[in-house]
Image (spheres, helix red, strand yellow):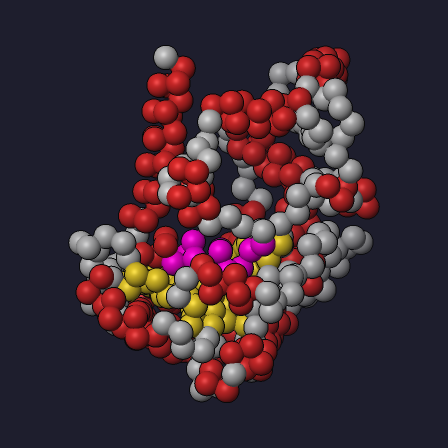
């Protein structure tokens, strides 16, 4: 009976894992970006390969093997972090900790160097891409393109996600991260109005700030369309990036101040449910887990400090922001935008997904310099890239 139950569970897991290929094109594109940006990662094929295919047939995944892994996770060497919150006092918290310690933590803990650490890779700018791929990429506005084809024959949509990397959270600091939030907040309506309402490229259009594991940051423009192919979508996204710069130039300083106030209000919105409060506190704790003892203490007022950056005119002791006026905020936003999104130092990657009818276009690009057509290509490129600093910004 147990063997049958295990086999059914394995089949269900395999089916659920493989269902990823039927996701929307823009979700596939986002997944491909993560495979390129982050390290270490395990591709979906690595998971399915444990359950089907030549390797799985030669060495099948067994219930005994799974049980041994569970035992190792629960009773082997580990690093434990816990949170007690709500209707529990210090004495009760200590009792909970004792139960966990006595039941599971019987071996010496992992040292800092054994703790898994995930990082974001630094994408190449145009000059660096030339060194990796050769002179053929010199004319490309986006020197690195990750292409894929939708799995479903009935999929009619194409998609593009234009990813423009800024810097690590450590390098940006409170002020840089706050400016990036303001840009993301202002950009969405402009992108939606231009790319969907006016140009009618597709029903899914967005512009937003994006964080990746290991403190990576970026600004993204995403479009999914049934009437326009990915290269054309990419070109329209690039033209909107230029257009939005002019729009911001024309905005009065007061617009930037009101946008900063709106972002600040959203950051400081109070948690209504206990689960939301737990999630916020636990998130701050988890952010410190990969770090050594120098950064091990959670900063529970981090969001408040972050919001203070967006409080213009502040001059009280302990302020983390030097932005005093709306005019100064506008100047900083435009400088940030020019540096990361419009200069020759821009670190841009495009993730394209074609519908099945356009597969010939995908095939024609396979092997071209700067074009990544498989996870194998992505692994090869990642060997040329350095990682961003993982130190916290607080």
Residues in magenta, as a range: 29-39
Q: Quadrant of residue 178?
A: bottom right
Verify whether residue 35 appears in magenta: yes
In front here: 97 or 116? 116
**Relative side of 324 to 153, left or right:** right
Q: Position of residue 351 (x, y in %)?
A: 40, 65
Q: Residue placed at 68% from the left, 26% from the top?
A: 76
Comparing 157 with 273, the one in front is 157
Q: Is residue 210 magenta?
A: no
Residue 190 position (above or below residue 107): below
In the rendered image of this protein, does residue 257 appear above or below residue 1?
Answer: below
- Residue 286, position as x, y percentages in the image: 64, 39
Camera-side residue of 128 and 54: 54
Above/below status of 6 relative to 315: above
Instruction: Using the image, determine if residue 149 lies above or below residue 105.
Output: below
Q: Position of residue 87 (x, y in %)?
A: 62, 16
């Amino acid at each position: 009976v147990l063997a049958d139950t295990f086999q059914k569970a394995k089949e269900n897991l395999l089916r659920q894992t493989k269902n990823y290929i039927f996701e929307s094109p823009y979700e596939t594109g986002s997944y491909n970006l993560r495979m390129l940006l982050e390290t270490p990662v395990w591709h979906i094929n690595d998971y399915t390969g444990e359950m089907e295919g030549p390797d799985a047939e030669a060495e099948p995944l067994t219930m005994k093997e799974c049980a041994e892994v569970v035992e190792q996770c629960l009773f082997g060497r580990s690093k434990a972090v816990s949170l007690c919150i709500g209707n529990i006092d210090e004495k009760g918290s200590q009792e909970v900790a004792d139960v966990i310690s006595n039941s599971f933590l019987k071996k010496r803990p992992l040292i800092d160097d054994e703790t898994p650490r995930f990082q974001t890779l630094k994408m190449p700018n145009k000059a660096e891409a030339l060194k990796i791929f050769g002179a053929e990429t010199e004319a490309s506005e986006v020197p690195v393109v990750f292409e894929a084809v939708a799995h479903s024959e009935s999929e009619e949509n194409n998609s593009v996600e234009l990813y423009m990397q800024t810097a690590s959270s450590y390098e940006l600091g409170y002020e840089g991260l706050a400016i990036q939030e303001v840009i993301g907040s202002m950009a969405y309506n402009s992108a939606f109005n231009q790319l969907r309402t006016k140009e009618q490229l597709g029903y899914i259009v967005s512009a937003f700030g994006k964080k990746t594991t290991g403190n990576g940051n970026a600004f993204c423009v995403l479009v999914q369309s049934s009437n326009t192919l990915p290269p054309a979508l990419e070109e329209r996204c690039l033209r909107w990036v230029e257009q939005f710069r002019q729009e911001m130039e024309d905005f009065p300083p007061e617009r930037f101040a009101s946008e900063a106030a709106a972002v600040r209000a959203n950051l400081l919105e109070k948690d209504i449910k206990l689960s939301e409060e737990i999630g916020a506190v636990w998130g701050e704790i988890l952010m410190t887990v990969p770090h050594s003892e120098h950064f091990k203490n959670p900063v529970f007022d981090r969001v408040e400090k972050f919001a203070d950056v967006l409080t213009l005119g502040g001059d009280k002791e302990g302020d983390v922001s030097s932005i005093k006026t709306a005019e100064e905020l506008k100047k900083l936003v435009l400088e940030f935008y020019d540096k990361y999104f419009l200069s020759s130092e821009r670190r841009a990657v495009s993730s394209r997904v074609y519908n099945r009818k356009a597969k010939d276009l995908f095939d024609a690009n396979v092997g071209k310099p700067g074009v990544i057509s498989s996870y194998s290509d992505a692994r090869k490129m990642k060997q040329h890239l350095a990682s961003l600093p993982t130190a916290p910004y607080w």
